[in-house]
Amino acid sequence: MEMNLKLSASGLTDIGLHRSSNEDSYFIQKDTYCFLVADGMGGAAAGEIASRIFADTAAQLIPQSGNQSESNTVALIKKIFLTANKEIRSHILSTPDHSGMGCTAELLLFHHNGFALGHIGDSRSYRLRNGKLTRLTKDHSLVQNQVDQGLISKEAARTHRLRNVISRAVGIEEKLEIDIIRGRYLTKDLFLLCSDGLTDMVTEEVITKILLRRESLQQRTATLIERAKTNGGRDNITAVLVEVLP
């Protein structure tokens, strides 16, 4: 059965203002309803390799038909994460200088009945619906754990000096715990996948205002990147927008 789903998408990545290399990767393939953002870590270009391994793994494993049931889609997401985890760890074994490399990842797939989203790390995924922005993911980070325990406020977390210390990443450990978020899509839903280089620099209130603009997806994607740079651009910045069309 063919999927009667039309999507529009735009992606952009930028090195930012303070980094010597871009360790982010993104992937857009509308024909197979696959979209992702990965943010590398590890330095010495190793983070760039890790995020690219994740993106390449998804590209290789996604079936060209794109006609998946919900259960098959969830199984595919897990397979991509686990395969990428294994590939990154194999790379580290062959290149010990890259020890400690890994990546965060957001992987969004659409299926007959809705969408499924795989998430690890502190990159984020959002959905804009009827003018309201909802964060679909929870950061796997030291600061988020402190927020959950009531030790610090959400406002304090934004500027905490340890806000970039993450508790989960692809490639760091042999066993991988993946968050899977499932849901239904509606016409005009707008999904945002992004690295923390965006959300550390731009508040969710400002992100919402930009996404609500009557501009093309490409213009809004570029505006998100430029706003992050205007506000400091301390990290690499990547954003992917996916809109469900009538």
Image (cartoon, grey):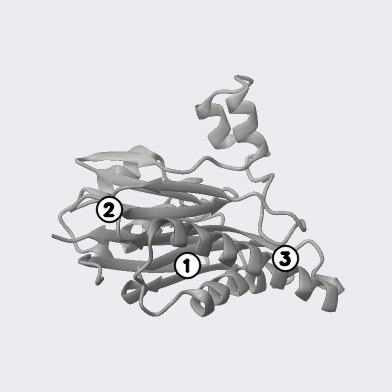
Give x and y (percent) for residue 214. 15, 55
Q: Which residue is mark 1?
A: 14
> In this rendering, does residue 201 appear at all?
no
Secondary structure type for disc 3: loop
Q: Earlier in the sequence, mark 1 or mark 3?
A: 1
Asked if residue 170 lies left or right of residue 100, the reply is left
Q: Position of residue 106 (x, y in %)?
A: 50, 57
Label 2 sits on what residue type?
A: Leu
Q: Nearer the viewer, residue 18 or 90?
A: 90
- At mark 2, the secondary structure is strand
Residue 32: percent from the left, percent from the top? 36, 73
Residue type of the residue flagged with mark 3: Gly
Q: Which quarter of the picture shows residue 204?
A: top left
Quadrant where the image shows the C terminus: bottom left
Of discs 1 and 2, which sits in the foreground? 2
Precedes in sequence: disc 1 or disc 2: 1
* 1 and 3 marks in contact (CB < 8 Å): no
Q: Residues within 10 Å of mark 2 (few under 14, many from 20)?
A: many
Dot 3: within a 10 Å radius of its alpha carbon, few (fewer than 14), some, or many (20 or more) residues?
some
Q: Position of residue 136 (x, y in %)?
A: 42, 43
Give the number of the disc on residue 190: 2
Mark 1 to mark 2 CA distance (whole Å): 21 Å
Closer to us: mark 2 or mark 3?
Answer: 2
- Real-space Cα distance between discs 1 and 3? 17 Å
Image marks 2 and 3: residues in contact by CB distance under 8 Å: no
What is the spatial separation of the Cα atoms under label 2 and label 3, in whole angstroms? 33 Å
Q: Residue at x 24, y 51 (%)?
A: 189
Q: Label 3: which residue? A: 43
On the picture, is 197 further left or further right than 88? Answer: left
